[in-house]
Image: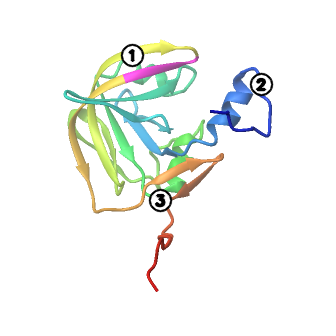
Amino acid sequence: MTEPADSSPPVDVDAETLRTLLRHQASTVTVVTAAGASAVGFTATSFTSVSLRPPLVLFCVALGSSSWPTISRARHVGVHLLARQQQELARRFATGGIDRFAAPTRWRPGPEGVPILDDTLAWLVCRVIDRVVAGDHAVVLAAPELLRHGEAGSPLLYHQGRYTDLAERPEPVVGRAA
C-alpha cells in the first residue's frame, strides 16, 4: 500500500509548530474553578474523561497561571462545560489581571465551597486525586463526586484559534431513491 502524498514536508517540532498543529483539533471549552482565599478560575480546553470505572477526569493548568497556586492545594474543583452562547464567559476566564468572578459573572458557592457558575451546559464538582507536573503544565486527575447538567444544548468549542460551535447543518442525502 502506498502512502498518501502530502503537500508539505514534515518539520521538527517546537512550541510554535505544535501549537499550529493543535489548532486543527476542536476542543470543548470548560471553566475550572476552585475555592481559596479568593475564588479562582480559568478557561481550559484540556478537559477529558479518563475512566468510567471508577469515574475519573483530567484537565491541565499552566504552572504560571494565577490559578495554579490555589489549584495546587485544592481538595475539590469545579469543571463547567460551557454552552455555545458563553463565549464572553470563556474570554473572561481566559483574561489575566481581572476579577473573573465580578459582575457580569453569575456564580454561587457550591458543594465543598467550590464556586459554581450559573447557566452552564453542565458542571461537575470533583475531588482532586493527583497532580502531575509535565513540562510547563500540571495534569490534574480528579474524581467527579457531583454533577448537574441542564437541558440539551450545543457546546462551546475552540478551533483554529477561535470559539465556535456545532452549527446545525443539514445532513447530506445519500442514495436517495428516485
Specify the segment rendered in magenta: 136-140
Residue 170 lies, in percent from the top left, at: 49, 73
Chief secondary structure of the magenta portion = strand
- The Cα–Cα distance between marks 3 and 2, rounded to whole angstroms, is 35 Å
Residue 149 lies, in percent from the top left, at: 26, 53
Give the structural element (helix, strand or loop) at label 2: loop
Mark 1: amino acid = Arg
Question: Residue 84 — which label?
Answer: 3
10 Å neighbourhood of mark 3: few (<14), some, or many (≥20)? many
Mark 2: amino acid = Val
Residue 66 lies, in percent from the top left, at: 53, 27
Residue visible at 44% across and 21% down? 139
Residue visible at 27% across and 32% down? 126
Give the structural element (helix, strand or loop) at label 1: strand
- Of the two numbered discs 2 and 1 on the same chain, state the one appearing first in sequence: 2
Residue visible at 35% across and 55% down? 121
Can residue 110 be found in the magenta stretch? no
- The Cα–Cα distance between marks 2 and 1, rounded to whole angstroms, is 32 Å
Q: Which residue is mark 2?
A: 11
Question: Residue 131 — which label?
Answer: 1
Q: Nearer the viewer, residue 62 or 37?
A: 62
- The Cα–Cα distance between marks 1 and 3, rounded to whole angstroms, is 30 Å
Up-down relation of residue 79 to residue 154 (above or below)? above
Q: Seen from this angle, which residue lies furthest bottom?
A: 178
- Of the two numbered discs 3 and 2 on the same chain, state the one appearing first in sequence: 2
Q: Nearer the viewer, mark 2 or mark 1?
A: 2
In the image: residue 122, left or right of residue 135: left
In the image: residue 62, left or right of residue 140: right
Up-down relation of residue 91 to residue 36 (above or below)? below
The answer to which quarter of the image holds residue 13 is: top right
